[in-house]
Amino acid sequence: MSIFSSRILRRKHPAGRRASALVSFVVAAAVGFIPGPRLDDGTFPAPESAVTQASPKASTAQPGNTAQPGNTAQPNNTAQPAHEAPPGSDDTELGNDVSWPQCNGALPDDPAFAIVGVNNGLANTTNPCLHEQLDWAEDAEGGTGQPRVALYVNTANPGLRGSWWPTNNEYGGKVVANPYGTCEGKEDAACAYMYGYAKAFDDAYLRTVDDPETYLWWLDVETGNTWSGDRNANRADLEGMTDFFHSIGARVGIYSAARQWAQIVGEVGTASSLYSLPSWLAGARSAAHARDMCSAAPLIAGGQVVLIQFVAGSFDYDHSCI
């Protein structure tokens, strides 16, 4: 998301929830792509060159480590006033998603539900305003069938182009049951699975999210991040993330657009842990179009379309299909 405004945040986060570890800020240079979730499902954008920050070693990973806040927002004086709902909308059905681009900027008033981005645009970073935005999200009104507060995380499968790549099946102080066999540091499905598992572990335990098991975690799958040309390996990567979140009792869904999902992952069989996950679709042009898109095919067979995203004025809006 890239929505900026000079409006001051309505609430300040408690001092005890400040972040303290350095994170890197990287903006994708892909044409038509804004780190999201906010997809432009038009021309195929060039992926980023690589991931820039290594995963922490599993032996030193401890819940509660924090990340240092940083200000990446840029004012946009044309922003829609935060209290205004998009034309033609039904306020009782609409939520909003926010993340690092809204740091120190406007946040929508009184969403029915809220989705907060955990990362800073890449899979191995932390949103520097995560806790301010979680505080804002707690004021969501609820009542739509959606979780009142949910999270989304960036995803990627960089292979050896990344600054960290797994070399075995160990992470988080344990040996992970890997359905693709033993990871030996190769760019294959076994190591992609471990990479995804590690990113989900980091998101749950290193990004300072309290009670990660209580959330629905949306996996943000976009061509603007780094992916393998092997869709089987990309699927394994997302399965690793899904399996970790499921292992702690959390729920999982997929955010993407049909065209980008097809390019990155393709079809998903019934044996995959991705099968039947709910879909959050990008690409609606208005509130009315979002309502119509609720009848679109889900990203994964066996799943259900539960959210449609559209942009109005300065904000990302999300129409609940349930």
Image: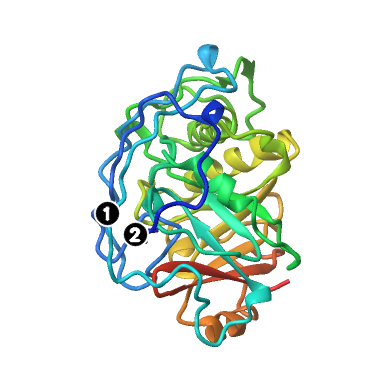
Q: Name the residue under label 1.
A: 74
Q: Regarding mark 2 in the picture, which secondary structure is present there? A: loop
Identify the secondary structure beneath mark 1: loop
**Dot placed on the residue nearer the N-terminal end, 2 or 1:** 2
Q: Report x, y in % for residue 72.
A: 30, 45
- Residue 275 visible within the image: no
The quarter in which the N terminus is drawn is: bottom left
> Label 2 amino acid?
Phe
Q: Tell which of 31 and 158 is nearer to you.
A: 31
- Is 228 above or below relative to 19? below
Q: Residue at x 64, y 61 (%)?
A: 113
- The reply to whether the C-beta atoms of the residues labelled 2 and 1 are less than 8 Å apart is yes
Whether residue 225 is visible to the viewer of this picture, yes or no, is yes
Which label was assigned to residue 201?
A: none
Q: In this view, does 174 lie to the left or right of 152?
A: right
Q: How crowded is mark 1: few (under 14 residues within 10 Å), some or many (20 or more)?
A: some
Closer to the camera, 259 or 26? 26
Q: Give the residue at mark 2.
A: 4
Left or right for 27, reference 271: left
Mark 1 belongs to which amino acid?
Answer: Gln
